[in-house]
Image (cartoon, rainbow, N blue to C red):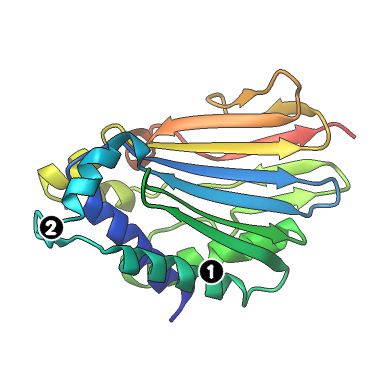
Amino acid sequence: MHMIRKTTLYIILFFSMTLFTSCFEVLEEINLNSDGSGTMLVTFNLSRSKSKIASVMLLDSVNGYKVPSKDDINLALKDAENHLKTINGISNIKKTADFENYIFTLSCNFDKVANLDAVFQDLIRQQNKKEKINFNTTNFAYNSATNNFERYFSYDTKIKKIFYKLKGEDRKVFNDATYTSIYRFKNAVKSISNTHAKVAPNKKAVFLKIDAMSLILGEKSVANTIQLSK
């Protein structure tokens, strides 16, 4: 199967577990070297609701959604890991599954930002076969000559339409959900374009935390142009 099928399964598994709570966070971390290589870590953190999730994991379904077993989740993570191994320039792929705190991660090294971008292109290309949402074909870019790092994102109103097709109870899962990105660099950050992002005191990291509803409704964006010093 393609990565997106398994990654979509992964998302669906967690969506079914979080229908009773909206306390979860998606964390995207990138450590970028001056030559464009680096590491990426994606974390799905449901620890704030771990006691409720543990109870739900004992059930077969919630609100009509199948509750995934530990084997289901481990299989989805394994399949995503296996597909990452097929992408050129991606290496040292690791996954973790903490079923005590309900924190799950995928990480990898990339030779250049274009390799990392290929992972997201694959994800979006396969997903859009159904929904036809207009996302950028490029999600990450880095120019080592100008020391410019780009996180692209263009909002499509179809996202909001798809969201409002969900049942009212299902939409509540996003009420307190958040997306956080942390980008770390070897060189100091000179400027950023996203007004919601913050530069670390040491000037070598950019932090952005956005509530899921603002992303879904198009009120905030993850797009950012980060100019680094030479």
Determine if residue 25 is in view: yes
In the drawing, what numbered circle is on residue 197?
none
Q: Is residue 168 left or right of residue 206?
A: left
Per the image, the residue denoted by label 1 is 81
Determine if residue 125 is in view: no
Under mark 2, the amino acid is Leu
Residue plotted at (25% across, 63% down): 68
Q: Are marks 2 and 1 in contact (CB under 8 Å)?
A: no
Residue plotted at (15% across, 60% down): 65
Q: Which mark sits nearer the N-terminus, 2 or 1?
A: 2
Q: Is residue 145 above or below residue 7?
A: above
- Badge 2 marks a residue whose secondary structure is loop
- Answer few, some or many: residues within 10 Å of disc 2's Cα (few below 14, many 20 plus, some between 14 and 19): few
Q: Please state the horizontal and vertical placement of residue 39, each as a whole percent of the image.
A: 69, 52
Q: Quadrant of the C terminus?
A: top right
Q: Is residue 11 above or below residue 175?
A: below
- Answer few, some or many: residues within 10 Å of disc 1's Cα (few below 14, many 20 plus, some between 14 and 19): many
Specify the farthest residue to the left.
63
Q: Is residue 6 left or right of residue 67?
A: right
Under mark 1, the amino acid is Glu
Residue plotted at (85% across, 45% down): 34
Q: Please state the horizontal and vertical placement of residue 98, each as a whole percent of the image.
A: 42, 51
Per the image, the residue denoted by label 2 is 59
Depth check, front residue: 163 or 112: 112
Depth check, front residue: 64 or 131: 64
Q: Is residue 132 above or below residue 193?
A: below
